[in-house]
Amino acid sequence: MSGTRGTIGTDGRRRKRPGSDRRVERDANVVWSGSWVAERLGVGLVGDGELRELLGLALRRNPKRAHLLVSNVLGKHVPQRPSVVYAAGYELGRRVRALLGEDGARRAVVLGYAETATGLGHSVTDGLGDAPYLHSTRRPVPGVARAGGFEESHSHATSHLLLPEDPHLLEAAGDGSALVLVDDEFSTGNTVLNTIRDLHERYPRDRYVIVALVDMRSPADRDRLAGFAAETGARVDLIARNTGTVTLPDGVLEKGRALVAEQERQSTPEEGAPPSSARTRVDLAWPAGVPDGGRHGFTPAHRALLEAALPALADRIAQALGDGPRRVLVLGFEELMYAPLRLATALEERTAAEVRYSTTTRSPVLAVDDPGYAIRTRLVFPAHDDPADGPGERYAYNVAGAGFDAVIAVVDSAGDTPALHAPGGLLDRLAPHTAHVLLAVIPSYVPATPDPARQEEAPMQLPEPLRGPAFSSYAPDEVGWLLQDLSDTRLEAPTEEREEAIQSGGAHYAESLPVEYQPSAAYQELFKSALAVSAARIARAVGTVTETVLAERGPRPVLVSLARAGTPVGVLMRRWAQARHGVELPHYAVSIVRGRGIDANALRWLAEHHDPADVVFVDGWTGKGAITRELAAAVTEFEKAGGVAGFNPEIAVLADPGGCVRTYGTREDFLIPSACLNSTVSGLISRTVLRADLVGPYDFHGAKFYRELAGSDVSGLFLDTVAARFDEVADAVDAEVKELLAADRAPTWEGWAAVERISEEYGIHDVNLVKPGVGETTRVLLRRVPWKILARRGAGTDLDHIRLLAEQRGVPVEEVDALPYTCVGLIHPQYTRGATGADGKAVESA
């Protein structure tokens, strides 16, 4: 176990945060705010030079500890510049990141303590960069299962609950994944020991990092933590901004109680001056999808969405304040510390007013109006969030008499009750001490829960991805399918019936499935020979696109393949990264439907579990680029509807013959053997289905698992055959990637122009019925009613399977010159079962 002390400068590689000079404002008379207690009780504070600037002392009525260490940078009891408060936690987070490394930081989980350290833990998480955050809570939430709990022995309110929405949040993500525990101070270390012991029994891991503003433990306390590390075999690191020791004389508890009683007898009751301030409710327009805090978990995706919204939120507050206030307090609410803090930092950046930040608290502390005492004034008001432990007093310290022109009280909606507004309530208590009281309410986040009693309040929690062998023939670590299993639902319809319904507008193509094509023995042999011939070519394209993604979107992108054609490519990209770099990339498959967009619930699941900026969409090939455009439009629509921002809609593909994307393995139009077959080369999964009676508003799109086709499955054969060629193409890939990264890879959309020309030239007048490229032409022959096939004159073995399928279905193959693709499939225009082909004869069906 390692302990740290001292200070650290601003990381020059990042944008300088407001207040990162870390200067702490001190009373003008430079009297230490702990001297009153030290002189009367003999309490000593010994530590490094900055310690007395960071900490003052106060007294409280508590049978376990008489004194209270009052932090000047925590933002709880002492109003402070919000940039200073935020920087204190953020810089500790940067130190944790340096300790763990980038990969370790990404796999870490941060846990903060209620109520005092909820905002500090959030700020540490921001400094860490990529980790999810959870804080303990004293507010139980019906329907949310406990993931743990522990006791804080010295506190006035001891029970802590852990209520993550994601039940797997606290599980170790592989060897060395750290749990980072954040508290404002370590006095004895008992609280953190209680936490680790409880969690280590439930979710064992081999690394913990403990973080605090100050470490005040005695040598005996330090030995207990070291003993735990030795007992469990876990590594325990400790990072603190400052270290020191509190020396306590004999009998300090009795002396403290007597001193508190004496001061309370002498104190003047709080003045009941009539309210004199204006009251304004500020409509924040809080961004949808962002929790009010970390009570149920706060992900990097949530943070990204909040960061983007902060300027507009601060502007709303500034507009409500007007030009008059020169000194403003943003006052948070008990556990609700981080959201008010970030509002305050944004307001500090966007207004000329002097902004301070602090929060209300449950903790009863004696107030003494003396420069040498940390708590000068106290406002008392009743609890206003219907707490589980019953009614009680709440407090706001150092607000009365502080000269604030305006106070912005920020509460969550659970705290916006009649008690908040009633005579004697918080707003009423603030009114005599400021000219303007503003109320900003943040929606209380209600986790999705399967509890039937709460189904009307919140959507069902999204399920975990489906995995093989229960769903698909792929190994469970190869891909997680963000789909629902419709295997027991009859969805297949004859091809001609589907085509007529689709073209007449009576149905969408995604509402049913074609009858799964069963390849003949000759066709299966053609697939195997094509695979043998093209395996090295495919391996090279896999390596090229994967290395490009790692170079531009790395180091640990999250692969999200577009089911199902993109899924074998995603699996191969994952295998390449593992074989060449030893990196295990997450890989999921999601549904996207032309004309209906991407599965928004799948995006929500991804945003809850990963940073959207890390997501790389993967597909097999481009035709004319319709899915490329569909995805871009769908992501934009998702964000407009309140979804988490940050997804990059660019697609990485194996082959880009249409010039539609900038991340590809090749722009040649050649036979990718996985295009030759349907489910039997795609893990036995059907094309995806989107139908209103089967897919509800909180469901993933559907698909079927064709278990009965296991005897014909070549999914593993395809993957293994290509992966076996990785080593031999490695040098060629390295050279090709070097050239590509330096080249202009901007999409040309050459394919789209060719499709428009062909559509008009052949009298089709619908680009959706023109399917360019080997892969899309294969799909036409397997799923739709083809009219004719256009083949580039002189095309060789890449079209053998096309010619065979066309012969089986009686479809003419027309060789043409100057075709930008190897082939183009034309779906029969205006199809009915009496339709005629180009030769005037009825269209033949398989």
Image: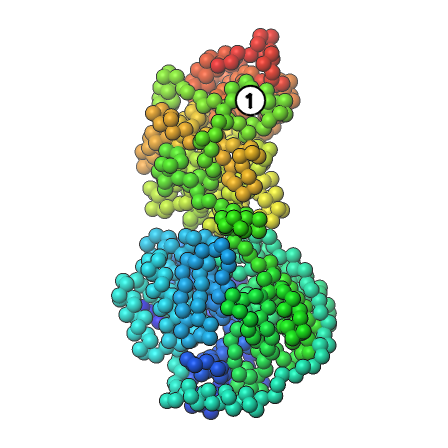
Q: Nearer the viewer, residue 825 or 823?
A: 825
The quarter of the rendered structure image containing the N terminus is bottom left
* Element on which disc 1 rests: helix
Give the answer, above or below, for where 394 lies relative to 490.
below
Residue indicated by mark 1? 498
32 or 825, nearer to the observer = 32
Left or right of residue 675: residue 371: right
Whether residue 275 can be seen here:
yes
Q: Nearer the viewer, residue 607 or 13?
A: 607
Q: In this picture, is 574 found above or below 310?
A: above
Whether residue 406 appears in this view of the structure is no
The residue sitting at 64% across, 82% down in the picture is 401
Q: Quadrant of residue 67?
A: bottom left
| Badge 1 amino acid | Arg
Q: Which of the 4 quarters of the picture holds residue 838?
A: top right
Q: Residue at x 28, y 70 (%)?
A: 227
